[in-house]
Image (tube, coloured by chain):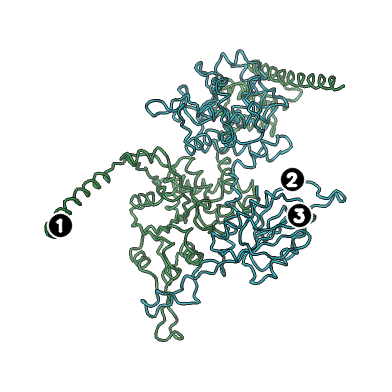
Chain colours: A green, B cyan
Amino acid sequence: MTNSTLLPATDTRLAVADGLLNLLRTTTTEPRPDEQLEALTLAVAADLPVLLWGEPGIGKTAALTQLAASLDLPLTTVIASVHEPSDFSGLPIVGEDPATQGVPMAPPQWAVELVRAGRGLLFLDELSTATPAVQAALLRVVLERRVGALRLPPGVRIVAAANPRASAADGWELSPPLANRFVHLYWVHDQEVVVRGLGGVWPRAVLPRLDPALLPEAVAFSRRVVCGFLTARPTLIHRLPSTETRRGGAWPSPRSWDAALTLLAFGTAASVSREVLALLVRGAVGDGPGLELLAHLDRMDLPDPETLLADPAAAELPERGDLRQAALEAVVAAVGARPERERWEAGWAVLVRALETGTADLLVAPATALAAVRRDDWEVPATMDRLAGVVGLARQADRSVERVAAAAAAAERAAAGTRR
Amino acid sequence: MEKLLAARLHAVKVRPYLAGALFALHVVEDRSVPTMAVDAHWRCYVSPGFVARTPMEELAGVWVHEVSHLLRDHHGRGERYARQHEEFGPGERSGTGVPPAEGWGRLRRNIAADFEINDDIYGDGLPRPAGAVLPSLLRLPDGLLMEEYLRTASMSGLAADLAWLDCGSGADGQDRPWELGPDGAHGLSRHQQDAVRFRVAEGIKGRPGEAPEGWRRWADEAFQAPQPWRQLLGAAVRSAAGAPGAGENHSYRRPSRRSASVPKVVLPSLRRTPPGVCVVIDTSGSVSDAELGSALLEVAAISRAVGGRRDLVSVISCDAAAGVAVPLCRAENIELVGGGGTDLRSGFARALRSRPRPDVIVALTDGQTPWPSAPPPCRTVVGLFPRPARAADEEDPDYVPDTPPSWARVVTIG
């Protein structure tokens, strides 16, 4: 056998293999809402540096590829761990006469190409496995957008990825000042998505679009939310992470509140769901303050007590029990703040309306509070009769609590008797 | 229905801190439910017959029980446990390989979740129902987590008696035929669930006197998953050892070998400076040998992982006076001498006197010691064995030990 007879045979074998590979790579996509990707898109659109935390191999890079395609930005991936610090801070080149000309810091090729293109998505992968010196150089790229003597144009957006501490090969972690500059998104895989994807159908996320008509309103809204919240909770404006478990994550500071405000405005302009807003806000200021801000948002959704009092018959109360009770308590508080007979009667009418549209046990606390607002010369309104069932329910519950207390006391007496 | 609502009022009255969560549940009447069950979307399915035959005060206990499943995220945790431990044993997998709804693994998870809940929610206004499943049935200790009960006990002895037990997918993460699923009405989204949980946790933390120990612990950990101390200690030691001056890093002390191919360019090279780690061990009587042994092994493993050679890791045992620094050759050979009172200051002084000077000092202690007044000139990690807050000295009950200083990174061990 000679070489000439071998070659065609290898060729056809490889061709068959290529055919198999082609078949394997032929996959389709289906639309599927993806909250993580929506959150990532908004944060990237808002030009805030994003840090994706995720175990190796769960599709962070795939998500970035899809994001770049949908935002129509060229993707530049730089794997931090295979570079040297000078690749990011610039290579010092000694010229003819350093004393007069200085030593220029030459940027690497990828940076030059990014600047030439004027726009792009820079993905800094494997941040956590690079040496500390490389990370220090990289953070300058992220924060000051400078690579050597070059400045990255505004059209370039930056996303970094890191492995969580538990699975990181070495123990690099973000210091609090650095963590504060990122929006932290935790990337997890969805079992269903992976199984369907390996079966040949990958998800195609519908990415949020900013509605130009909503822009001024979105800015006003998010300013109102954040300022109102921080006025009520001034201690949350700045709180350094104190415990070891909180290190390296998001924490609240004026800088990260500013990021949260921006993200809230972007989310509102894109009309994304509360889930996505929650991911973004918690990623910017941390879990606790983020959740409190969202609770504040929920409370802002509650109907205005004055509107309810003005027209009790048409009152629209929230469906969810805890929110409904909060709305009723706000009504009672509003009556108590300016106690007038008409308002007090309107308050009872709101409670009757609540009884007609929902469960009775929610009314016990507000009804007791409203009854306490009564002045001596106010007569009991006729609508009160309709709330008799609520009083009965409260009595039943009280009797049940008393029965338990009595049984416990009896058991204690019996135990004391045997001891004696 | 009225009885059920009155029972909810009873529950709110005796457990005011759970009110928000109890009211957030949406009640669905369904005759196919065995008793009462919750799903992962915070709906509560109730059998009318069960309500009719159960006394009101017991129903109140059931309300609290079901809402506890949801607050403690048993559906998410049950699902994760099932996936990680391949909880699809022979009893669970049917012929086609699809796990049937009523499986052995599901029941096990439900029982373990009930163990976690039932040991501390009853009493104090809530009578314990006759059929409540308690860890003592299997002679297990109270106060463990669902995952711990699952790991330690087989529960096969209980299965036959408790086959009726069914708290819904909210308790174990497996869907039931009667459930409305994620698209049904009145469900809570994940963010809404988090918000309710958060408010309940804040309520408990705000008035810690009212809630029992179990709930207070839950509130502390609900949004801050406790990280295993091994990982925290590892990260702390590694980041201390990887700091400038030690560990593997780029350095301009010597030109890189890449420089030869790019004339005129000055490149740093990758240098490795193995960090010296000195472990100061509190050998006073208050720290147990088992605690010390496990922590010390951990430190030795971590320092090897960061590239420390064995001869660069030394150990100083320290009670009121410091012993000599012993190089760590084999972890099991270390002789820990001591007992009695503690003064870690002498341990720190001894560590800093040793040559070469360590890059990192790791102190393993229970914290009942005075600390150096100034930060030592190297990075410091404190592994702290937690001790209940109490007056440590009987002769001087006002004595309160100092907390570890702010310049050290503190990892709570155990």
Which residue is at 18% across, 50% downward? A13
Q: Which mark is residue B388?
A: 2
Left or right position of B279 against B373: left
Graded by Cα atoms within 10 Å as few (under 14), some (14 to 19) or many (20 or more), the crowding at tag 2 reads: few
Graded by Cα atoms within 10 Å as few (under 14), some (14 to 19) or many (20 or more), the crowding at tag 3 reads: many
Circle 1 — which element?
helix
Left or right position of B316 against A228: right
Q: Amino acid at mark 2?
A: Pro
Q: Amino acid at mark 1?
A: Leu
**Label total for image:** 3
Mark 2 vs mark 3, foreground winner is 3
Residue B178 in percent (x, y) is at 47, 21
Does mark 1 fall on the same chain as mark 2? Answer: no
Vertical placement of A176 versus A193: above or below?
Answer: below
Q: Chain of mark 1?
A: A
Residue A127 in percent (x, y) is at 46, 59
Q: Quadrant of residue B407?
A: bottom right
